Amino acid sequence: MMDERLQTEIEAAAFRRLVEHLRSHPEVQNIELMITADFCRNCLAKWLKAEAEARGVELDYETARERIYGMPYAEWKAKYQTEATPEQRKAYEERQKRKQASQ
């Protein structure tokens, strides 16, 4: 049985491992993550910012993105982001329609 502090430490370590995994796979595009899992690196940054603010810690979005990407977003985008293909755009739009229909 684990106490709340230990659980938080384990969850934080798993989060850091997820972030490191995404950093080590820049070939995986955000749109692919959105199509498949309905979240991306930018979502993680938004969640990080929201959780910081919920605890009274000011964290701007660009700083949160840098913590997720491991570098300024503009730099990551220039190095790794590719243009979404028509197929990816269509799959993303279909995913969003399904998501809206289920709400």
Image (tube, helix red, strand yellow):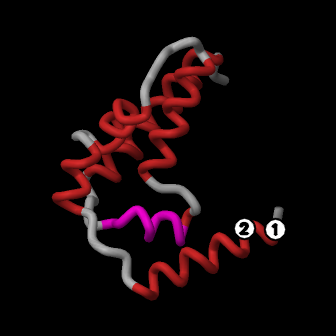
Image location of residue 64, percent across then percent down: 40, 33
Image location of residue 12, percent across then percent down: 48, 29
Quadrant of residue 88 in the image? bottom left
Q: Is residue 83 left or right of residue 37?
A: left
The amino acid type of the residue labelled 1 equals Ser
The amino acid type of the residue labelled 2 equals Lys
Report which residue position mark 1 lands on.
102
Q: Residue at x 70, y 74 (%)?
A: 97
Q: Residue at x 44, y 70 (%)?
A: 32
Find numbered disc 2 in the image and state the secondary structure of the residue it sits on: helix
Q: Is residue 103 left or right of residue 33?
A: right
- Is-magenta flag for residue 46? no
Disc 2, disc 1: CB below 8 Å? Answer: yes
Q: Which residues fall within the magenta stretch? A: 28-36
Report which residue position mark 2 lands on.
99
Q: How far apart are the two marked residues, 2 and 1, measured between alpha carbons? A: 5 Å
Q: Residue at x 37, y 44 (%)?
A: 19
